[in-house]
Each structure stands twice: as structure tokens, then as C-alpha cells.
Amino acid sequence: MKSFFNFGLAPEVIKSIENLGYSDPTPIQDKAISKIMIGKDVLGIAQTGTGKTGAFLIPIIHRLQPMANNSTSPARHPIRSIILAPTRELADQIYENAKSFTSFSFLRVGVVFGGVNIDQQKELLNKGVEILIATPGRLLDHLKQKNIRFDFVSIFTLDEADRMLDMGFLPDLQQIIGKLPKKRQSLLFSATFSDEIKKFSKKILDTNSELVQVSSSNSTAVTVDQIIYELMNYEHKKRYLHILINNNKASQILIFTNTKNEASSLSNHLQKNKFLTDSIHGNKTQSDRLKVLDSFKLGDIRILVATDVAARGLDIPELPVVINFDIPFVAEDYIHRIGRTGRAGSSGIAISLMTSDDEDRILEIENLTQCSLKRERVGIEKTKLLSESNLKKNNDKNFSLSQKHKSLSVPGISRNLKSRVRQQKLPVLLTSHPIKNHQKK
């Protein structure tokens, strides 16, 4: 693996990387940066939390650096690179990263997304930006109002393309791509490598494009311990969730639900039970969602309940725990959800709470990831006993995170296995039998 200094990056980019405290690229950065630097179209397959944002931002900034200038004339700062993200939160996260990577450059960076005043965004665009991050819908709004032009766009990037297609953005993407200069560099990044992504990539990437893949397609990160608790019903899930939270010393917990109403309801339920909790979902305004995200990042709230779309772009270094209160409807969403933890080599735990109604969804997840997930059945009586017991006396048996040593433990995870994972980054909590032997009950 190279050091960042071996790529031949522009001095301004190197200074920004040094300022951020980075020295060595992640695997996806190691494979993608050099190819993007020489102008290749790239299809990058990498999970969330692998450093894929830097994998395209760093070489994009390097390529545009020769055009950087400190002129006050908007004409000297045309849009040269467009980066599309499926959600406002992810667009904002990419924008923050882009600002960090251009901290020693005169390149201007901007972001536009829905839910905020479009006139304020128009003022920004009128001043000129070389790198524009956007959501598809808002970018089309600005195009229709003639607030932006694509004449000088030379690099086009789609981040989380699989999510874009899942959310029904294909018609918007086709409109946008149709207005771009035909002579351009195109980059497409996805967490999963589905047939739909393969087909879509052939439409927008050059025939000589490069495939960059850092792990087996549709896999989960090896640094994430995964376990499923089989419970009786919805009320049983809520009771056992209390136990998990009470026995957990982690400073932050991210809980996923399938619907906006469930996110709000579960958050209210946890608040009534004295947990520092809030939620993000589509029914909240953009400003409210950003405030909640900031509170979670700063540690003002300990538990965040979120829907899949609302959590996109959430970047919490070393987020220790993700809980799937609801098993996702779409198997690919499981990969995205647990990708919130175990980021960039750090360890994490992903817990899923299921009932018998979720059996088919679990099998779909196992088929997609090609591994059989460890399960533990929890009876009502066990839940009652755990609820009534002195939780501090059961730390070795129950799920806990030591603040001092940051050691993770969940029922069913051996200490020896945990040690091996930390030292060798082995896949964890996968049963030894191949998935083809897993019989549906």
C-alpha cells in the first residue's frame, strides 16, 4: 500500500491531508486515487466507512488544482466537478469533507439540496464554485431556473449509486447526465455490486473504465460483529431493547426502524423511559434533522433513532453500536445500516431484533452477504429475569462496552474470537456451516 506522498498529489492537497492527520490511504483510496488522477472512469465498490469519499475527492481536487485562482470574478470559478448524493445529509457530509481537502486551495466548494431556501443557494452559485455537491432534485431545480451551467464540467461523480437507484432517482439522473458535456470523466461509487449497478454503469462510464473493488461484493465489514436476537413479538422487542441499552456502556447507539412513524414512536417511548434519545426521519424539517445529527455527534444525546434515508451521510468516527429494531425490507439496506459502525478499520457491533415474521428477510440478507448470521433465541422469562436483575453483576453475560478499554461483548461472542478479530481483523459471528446448509424453518 502506498503512502499519500507516493501518488504525486498537488502540494495543496498534500498539505490538507497532513493537516487532517492522515498518512496512509485506505484500501479503496489506494486502488482508486491513481486511476482517477490520470483521468480514468472508475466504478468503485466499497462499503460505507471505508474512506470512499476521500477516494474520489482527493484526486478530483488534484485534477482541478491547476485551474484554482483567487480571482473575485465569478467567471473565473465555473462549475468543473459535480458530485451527486442521494440525500441531503450525505451531500452535506461530502461538502464538509471537500472543504477540509481544499483548505489550502483557492478552489471553491458549494452544496445544494432541498429543504432550504433556493434563493440563498442561487446567491452562492452566482459567486462561482468549481466543485458542486448536490442532490439530484435540487440540481434539476437550479438547472430549470438557469442558475447553473454545465459547460465546463469535466468530472461527474455519483456517490452511493445503488441508493440512488433504490430511491427512484433514475429519471432525474438521466436528465442530468443528458445535459453534461459528452467529453468528461465519470466516477460511480456503490456499496453493493448488483446487476442493476452493472447495467447502469455501462450507460454512463467509458468502455475502458476501471473496476475498483476492495472486498467481495455485497459483503459486510469484517470489523463488525453481527448477532440476531430472536424474540416473540413487538412488545418483547421493546423490552429487550431496554435491556441492551441498560447493559451497554457505549456513549452512542444508532437504532434503525423501517418507517418514519416507528422512528418517532420508538424515540418517544425511549424518552419516556429516561433515555437521552431523539430521532431523524423524513417528517422532520432539514434544519431540525441537522440539529439532531449535531447533538448526536457532540454527545448531547446518546441514542439516535433513524430511518434508512435520514441516516445516510451520518459519519461518526468509531460509532460502537448499531441496532436494527426493525429488519430492513431490502437486504441491501442491512449492509448500509451496519456500515455505520466498524468504519475505517475500527470495531463495532451490529445487533438485529427479529420475530418469526422476519425470517424471509433474514434469509435474503444471508443470501446477499453469503454468510449465515449468528442467532440467539431469547424467551420471555429470560427477558423478565434480566430486567429484574442487578445488571452490573451480569456484564460478562450481557452486552457491554468498556469505556476504559473499549472492549465489546455481546451474548454469544467469545473473548478469544474478539481478540483474534482485533489482531487479525477476521470475519466474526458467522457460523461455520456454509449458507447452503441453512434450512428455512
Image (cartoon, grey):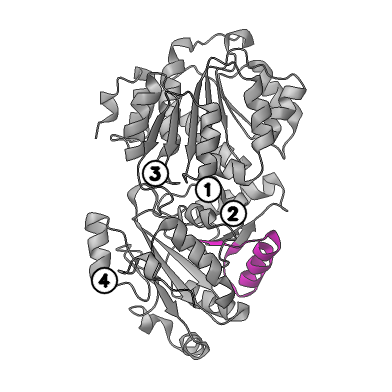
Provide the residue span drawn in magenta: 253-277
Q: Secondary structure at mark 3?
A: loop
Q: CA distance from mark 2 to mark 4?
A: 32 Å
Q: Position of residue 75 (x, y in %)?
A: 62, 8
Label ID, residue 415: 4
Task: Name the N-terminal-most of marks 4 and 1.
Answer: 1
Q: CA distance from mark 3 to mark 4?
A: 26 Å
Q: Of discs 2 and 1, which sits in the foreground?
A: 2
Q: CA distance from mark 2 to mark 1?
A: 11 Å
The amino acid type found where label 4 is placed reads Arg
What residue is at 49 percent from the left and 78 percent from the top?
441
Q: Secondary structure at mark 4?
A: helix
- Mark yes or no: residue 45 visible: yes
Q: In this figure, which residue is indicated by the disc labeled 2?
A: 308
Q: Of discs 3 and 1, which sits in the foreground?
A: 3
Q: Nearer the viewer, residue 62 or 107?
A: 62
- Mark yes or no: residue 15 visible: no
Task: Name the N-terminal-most of marks 2 and 1.
Answer: 2
From the viewer's perspective, tell me whether residue 407 is left or right of residue 311.
Answer: left
Tag count: 4
Disc 2 vs disc 3: Cβ atoms closer than 8 Å?
no
What residue is at 51 percent from the left and 89 percent from the top?
384
Q: Position of residue 238 (x, y in %)?
A: 58, 76
Q: Position of residue 419 (x, y in %)?
A: 23, 64
Task: Name the N-terminal-most of marks 2 and 3.
Answer: 3
